[in-house]
Image (cartoon, grey):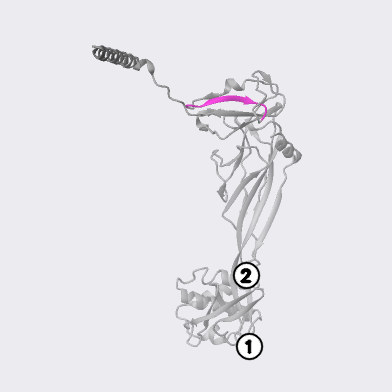
Amino acid sequence: MKKLFNIVLSLLIVAVLTISSIVTINAAPQSITVDREGVMESYIGTGYKWAKFRTSDGKVAYCMDLLKAWPERKTQITLSKEADAGLTYILANGYPYKSIRGNDDVDRFITQAAVWWYLSDTGQTGALSPDFTTNASDSQGYRADIKKLVNAAKNAKASANPTLDVSVKDSEMKLSEDGQYFISENVTPSLTGSSTYKVAVTGAPSGTTVTNTSGKAQNSFKAGEAFQVRIPSNALGKTTTINVNVTATGAISKAYIYNPSDSNMQRLVVLYTENVNLSKTVSFKATVDKPKVCVDYVIVGDVRPDPELTDPTPGTSCYDKGTKYDQEDELTTRQENCKFNGWYTNEDLTGKWTDGTPLNNDMTLYGAWDCGTTVSVPNTAASLPLIILGVGLVIIAGGVGIVIYRDKKLNAKK
């Protein structure tokens, strides 16, 4: 225990320490197979029936080059580069990620048309015909949905990475009114791109817990919820600094361009969602007003009585330095058929602890239980009459035997 506190003290930081970490997990494969799974119906005019593609990992893929041939069935495609913000916007807000008209076939047609319209307007593919953009029949007004996606794409900016920020106004933990805990301030992390976060504590004494603002133990929180950290006051012997790690997993969508090996075939664009692991570490300090020493209780041997029926249980407790310590008086047991053999200063159960000795240094006390089986002894008092009767019968039988023997001897002489 003393060694643990020395390690913690060596990490003592006066100001709040904040450490950030961001790790992005790239979801886009370097190479993948794409399959042509059918042809779309033409929802504007009659001559605009485009192929539908899906990758072997289940992603919808969209064609990019109007004047090139469709990739063959089961075509191997290779990652070329990340697409621009405009294409990312169209795919993220089109089929299958967003509903436009509530019809999958229509939504897929609108999304493919928006890809080509955007690429045509930005000079990245051949020009769409005026028939499609202006003249062809559009009784359902799908052209307006396409233009809406294209116009938004032209103004789109690169997606921002998810973020996590944790700030602490006061790193000093406060003692609760009942004196049972040191409690941190309420901390509400700031999150973007993620709806939940988790909290864990390192370098903390046994019994330290993460809680909600009502004091209930909790490790996972929704964005916008606050957490606290609580340290049992009797577990602290010295001023201690602990680290609180806040983590979250965000997501960011990115479009990637893939090329077939045959340059006469169309390039394809696919949307992938990448996970971003976020973490932040802040520090809190619990200041002990009076010097304390801690006693670590260890039970030796294989006997482990029910801890619910034994005080104190194995663990650690801290007391004001100089306290005249009466451990044997504190120990109470309601164990059946068990005897506590006392506390000792050595693991081999030597050096019996003497009650009333002042505590001036951290120490470990070793104790042992004896829960051997009880041997049943017969109640001879209850059986005494039967014993006497048995003895009497033996004596009588013996006397009868002697009389018979004598009669036989006398008859023989006659």
Q: Name the residue under label 2.
A: 28
Q: Give how far across and how far down residue 303 sits, in percent.
A: 54, 33
Give the camera-side residue of 228 and 157.
228
In the image, what residue occupies the spot 55% across and 81% down? 74
In the image, what residue occupies the spot 56% across and 48% down? 220
Give the side of residue 96 with respect to residue 391, left or right.
Answer: right
In the image, what residue occupies the spot 48% across and 26% down? 337
Q: In this view, does 75 lie above or below 384?
A: below
Give the camera-side residue of 329 and 34.
329
Does the magenta run of residues contain 402? no
Q: Name the residue under label 1.
A: 264
Q: Indicate the secondary structure of the residue bearing disc 2.
A: loop
Looking at the rendered image, the quarter that the N terminus falls into is top right
Mark closer to the chain start, 1 or 2: 2
Tag nearer the camera, 1 or 2: 2
Q: In which quarter of the image is residue 111?
A: bottom right
Q: Give how far across and how far down residue 178 sits, in percent.
A: 58, 28
In the image, what residue occupies the spot 34% across and 16% down? 387
Magenta region: which residues?
336-346
Q: Is residue 104 above or below residue 229?
A: below
Whether residue 192 is visible, yes or no, is no
Q: Is residue 390 above or below residue 34?
A: above
Q: Quadrant of residue 291?
A: top right
Give the camera-side residue of 183 and 105.
183
Furthest residue in direction front, as rendered? 414
From mark 1 to mark 2, how far is it between C-alphas? 24 Å
Q: Give how far across and how far down residue 177 sits, in percent.
A: 59, 29
